[in-house]
Image: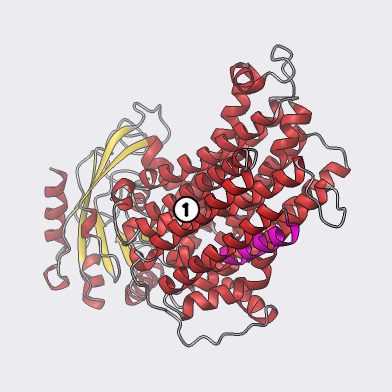
């Protein structure tokens, strides 16, 4: 389903609009307050401008540390839609307090409203993401996350710009107050259109002690390694995002010698880029979770972040304070703009799959609390970003050097995560093969069961057939491969972590063969999908070899449906044996179309090796 159609759904659009209004008001209020402090002399206790701006940010982020655990418990205990409506009612009141602060120039009221909006966002965060799996189908969740991510950053952009512009108008405080209240009322109205989302963990005890439940939530995230590492990956995304947003004013003013308008331009490019990257995720992942986009995103982020260092500083031909248009027209300005846009697009590729993985792989009765833990860690990493930049400033590092440091740090973090969870790297290789090296067309994907055990059987044309199948099947697939293929430290490590089952002919190694059948039976008993290539070897002339009877033994011992598949147009590729040894030859084609045709499942009692051979051969035709 396309994202445009998703926006038309009553199960999604009200939630999208509600969260958009909340994110808009967060930044509308904060930036109006910052402008009053920075340019209009609003102070409290004689604190300097820089300290006051830091206090505003601290008031907003503090609730994430104090109340995220309670917010997660609340979202799991109560109907999520009910929580959203209460939060939106509270937002209208908070905007009333903020309006009073603006009209009376009361720093205390404004700080209080920022702190209360921090509580609002703390409570709303776990609900807006954990509700998606309840309202959307599996093939809609990636698109839903992409829209939420894109909408959030566009709301941040618009709110920040409007807060700065409207507070400078005549009677700006009045106009900002009216805008804050109007947007909060719109969010409240849209919240009443969100369908009910019943609680998934009603027996969880509520406690107002912020320490112990926070610690318990953080410990619970380690139950599923892929979820925990996704939390850490997302938090690193927010580290980089916070660092970039903090650097923009100094970068524009001190390194590029440009005016305030260039800072706004950077914010626009950054926010729009993340929105574009997020929206592209659904298309690149074919509407399903695709972890291969995460390494792809991290590579792009590192490359374009590093290029901000190599771009250097001032372009002599541009002149000082060339204005927004003059900056865009200069070679340096164009290069920096493209780097920022590309970086943020790849950041969207990085973040959306991680968000989706957390929602899909977290236990339903713990999902909101896991997302609450994510918010705590995100907030911590944003604080660490501020500390990192403070250290860089103390060491007098230039902004381009800081960009290079962030790029190198991103490489280290990415390698660490992918070594811990090779699934990310494996999916990247598989995704790249299917979308860059080839153009894969899949027919009959609906025949793959969304849950439960099944055996996939396929013809064997090349050394990368298993990658083609893995790219097409979004569920984890346990492949049965010749044990010789699993030699070498790196390959063996990847294949072992991917739970590949090694097999050998009975005449060569009977113990490996028997162990393979035991592993297959165990995986099927646990509801997994097994894929085998019954020919037992890659074709040497493009024609199919007879299917071996091992498939009959598999379904006899564990009766499950068998799904025939056929790979098309791989004969003659670089990885096939046509024209010489596979791989050891000159490629004849690039990005050629290949296909995978998937047939309806066959009942186990009807399975024979010859019958499957005939089915697959017919699919090839």
Q: How many marks?
A: 1
- What residue is shown at x 75% (from left), y 18% (from top)? 320
**Where 364 falls versus 299 (above or below)?**
below
- What residue is shown at x 36% (from left), y 50% (from top)? 471
**Left or right of residue 44: residue 266:** left
In front of the other: 377 or 189:
189
What is the chief secondary structure element of the magenta stretch? helix
Residue 115 painted magenta: yes
**Left or right of residue 519: residue 152:** right
**Where 618 falls versus 378 (above or below)?**
above
**Left or right of residue 166: residue 491:** left
In front of the other: 145 or 451:
145
Report the span colored magenta. Answer: 106-120
- Name the residue tied to disc 1: 20
In front of the other: 557 or 226:
226
**Where 185 falls versus 437 (above or below)?**
below
């Amino acid at each position: 389903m396309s994202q445009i159609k998703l926006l038309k759904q009553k199960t999604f659009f009200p939630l999208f609009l509600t969260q958009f209004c909340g994110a808009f008001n967060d930044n509308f209020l904060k930036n109006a307050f910052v402008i009053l402090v920075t340019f209009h002399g609003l102070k409290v206790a004689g604190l300097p401008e820089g300290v006051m701006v830091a206090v505003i940010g601290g008031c907003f982020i503090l609730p994430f540390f104090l109340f995220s655990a309670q917010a997660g418990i609340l979202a799991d205990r109560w109907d999520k839609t009910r929580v959203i409506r209460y939060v939106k009612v509270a937002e209208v009141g908070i905007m009333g307090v903020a309006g009073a602060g603006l009209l009376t120039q009361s720093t205390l009221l404004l700080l209080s409203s920022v702190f209360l909006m921090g509580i609002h966002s703390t409570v709303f965060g776990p609900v807006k993401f954990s509700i998606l799996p309840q309202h959307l189908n599996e093939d809609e969740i990636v698109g839903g996350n992409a829209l939420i991510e894109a909408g959030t950053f566009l709301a941040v952009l618009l709110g920040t710009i409007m807060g700065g512009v409207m507070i400078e108008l005549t009677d700006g405080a009045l106009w900002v107050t009216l805008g804050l209240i109007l947007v909060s009322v719109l969010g409240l109205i849209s919240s009443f259109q969100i369908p009910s989302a019943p609680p998934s963990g009603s027996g969880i005890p509520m406690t107002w002690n912020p320490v112990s439940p926070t610690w318990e939530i953080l410990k619970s995230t380690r139950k599923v390694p892929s979820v925990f590492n996704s939390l850490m990956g997302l938090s690193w995304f927010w580290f980089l995002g916070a660092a970039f947003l903090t650097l923009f004013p100094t970068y524009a003013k001190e390194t590029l010698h440009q005016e305030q308008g260039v800072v706004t331009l950077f914010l626009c490019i950054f926010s729009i880029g993340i929105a574009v990257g997020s929206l592209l995720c659904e298309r690149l992942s074919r509407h399903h979770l695709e972890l291969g986009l995460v390494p792809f995103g991290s590579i792009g982020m590192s490359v374009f972040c590093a290029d901000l260092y190599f771009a250097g500083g001032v372009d002599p031909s541009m002149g000082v304070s060339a204005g927004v248009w003059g900056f865009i027209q200069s070679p340096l300005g164009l290069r920096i703009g493209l780097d920022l846009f590309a970086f943020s697009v790849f950041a969207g590729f990085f973040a959306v799959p991680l968000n989706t993985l957390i929602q899909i792989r977290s236990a339903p009765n713990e999902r909101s609390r896991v997302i609450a833990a994510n918010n705590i860690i995100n907030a911590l990493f944003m604080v660490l970003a501020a500390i990192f930049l403070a250290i860089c400033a103390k060491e007098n590092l230039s902004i381009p050097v800081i960009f290079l440091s962030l790029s190198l740090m991103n490489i280290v973090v990415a390698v660490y995560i992918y070594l811990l969870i090779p699934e990310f790297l494996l999916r990247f290789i598989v995704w790249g093969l299917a979308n860059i090296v080839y153009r894969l067309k899949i027919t009959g994907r609906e025949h793959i069961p969304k849950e439960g055990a099944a055996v996939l059987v396929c013809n064997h044309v090349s050394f990368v057939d298993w990658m083609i199948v893995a790219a097409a099947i979004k569920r984890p697939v346990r492949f049965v491969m010749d044990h010789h293929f699993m030699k070498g430290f790196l390959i063996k490590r990847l294949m072992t972590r991917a739970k590949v089952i090694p097999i050998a002919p009975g005449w060569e190694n009977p113990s490996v063969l028997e162990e393979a059948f035991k592993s297959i039976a165990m995986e099927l008993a646990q509801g997994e999908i097994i894929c085998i290539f019954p020919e037992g070897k890659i074709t040497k002339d493009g024609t199919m070899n007879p299917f071996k009877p091992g498939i009959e033994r598999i379904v006899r011992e564990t009766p499950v449906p068998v799904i025939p598949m056929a790979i098309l147009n791989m004969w003659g590729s670089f990885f096939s044996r046509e024209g010489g040894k596979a791989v050891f030859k000159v490629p004849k084609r690039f990005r050629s179309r290949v296909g995978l045709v998937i047939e309806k499942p066959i009942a186990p009692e009807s399975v024979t090796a010859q019958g499957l051979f005939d089915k697959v051969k017919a699919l090839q035709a």
